[in-house]
Amino acid sequence: MKPARIVVLGGTGFVGSHLVPRLAAQGVQVTVLSRNRERHRELAVLPTARVVSANVYDANALAAHFKGADAVINLVGILNEPGFNGSGFRRAHVELTQLAIKAMKTAGVSRLLQMSSLRSGEGESWYLKTRGEADTQVKSSGLDWTIFRPSVIFGRGDGLFNRFAMLLKLAPVMPLARAHAKFAPVYVGDVCAAFERALADRATIGQTYELGGPDVVALREIVTMTRDALGLSRLVVGLPDALGKLQAAAFGLVPGKPLSLDNFRSLLLDSIPARNGLAELQIQPTPMAAIVPRMLGGEEGKQDELDTYRRFRPERD
């Protein structure tokens, strides 16, 4: 039976912006903890969801918000940190997970769904190292946990296709570090479905699910697919690793860090599931071709907005 009350950490981010409306549409009472609730008024249209301003790094505050909940979902994650020494990744992934576990035990909440990443705990990037440390904390917590390890996630508002779309519009040539790195991009709707299945099925407790889509592609193919969907004429040039590393170092100094050395180190490992977690959860994976062209043309986002409006608009007499 699906929990009736859920608290979500990171619910205003990319995956959360898709998952929270889906849960609310099913009548689940969803509390999203945010640093500033006023910046997320779009969730106000959801009658069973609320955004609460909270310091998520205060274990006592977390425990107070967790009290009475049936489950906690931790979606918090960062792809880049303000500095360069891993402390930002450690704070977002490891320290917050530790605090959430402590607060759940204080509040008497046992069910935890944790977002992680494929290849967590492997390689030399701070991102993957700290994801792995957080996974270890969850597994040793004594809670009723389920961990999800997706490859790169795509969909409306993603940081993958949409970021490359922005960069491709800037210049006629796209120099690309680690152009041959492999991924199995997974649709955000399928990731949300995996969380929903886990909430409804206690057999998923103590399980780790690797999530990937049906297409295994190189980074170059992701970029060229974006280019073609936008109707642009751009040359995509793969860089040797020496130049790619220099590019990452330079871009890491640019506001917003379109690419960083830590990203480069993550790209040294292919992101392809060893197990088909979607199949294990009986979810049919969505191919990129079914979503990406419509998404980059704005059609997917418009349809989502219409569906949300129809679902929550008040009934007329």
Image: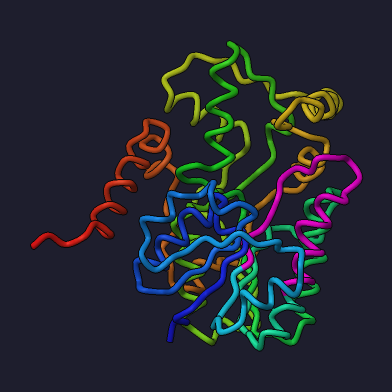
Residue at position x 36%, y 37% in the image? 294
Give how far across and how far down residue 174 sits, in percent.
64, 19
Find residue 71 and report its image quarter. bottom right
Q: Is residue 48 left or right of residue 179?
A: left
Towards the viewer: 51 or 205 = 51
Toward the left, the furthest residue is 317
Towards the viewer: 52 or 86 = 52
Residue at position x 64%, y 64% in the image? 115
Toward the top, the furthest residue is 172
Q: Is residue 224 above or below residue 138?
A: above
Q: Quadrant of the C terminus?
A: bottom left
Towards the viewer: 83 or 42 = 42
Give how far across and how far down residue 38 sits, in percent.
53, 49
Magenta region: 74-100
Residue at position x 39%, y 34% in the image? 293
Find residue 1 and report its image quarter. bottom left
Q: Is residue 257 above or below residue 137?
A: above
Towards the viewer: 312 or 211 = 312
Give how far across and how far down residue 287 sits, in percent.
43, 49
Q: Is residue 96 magenta?
A: yes
Q: Is residue 291 above or below residue 189?
A: above
Q: Is residue 130 above or below residue 103?
A: above
Q: Is residue 129 magenta?
A: no
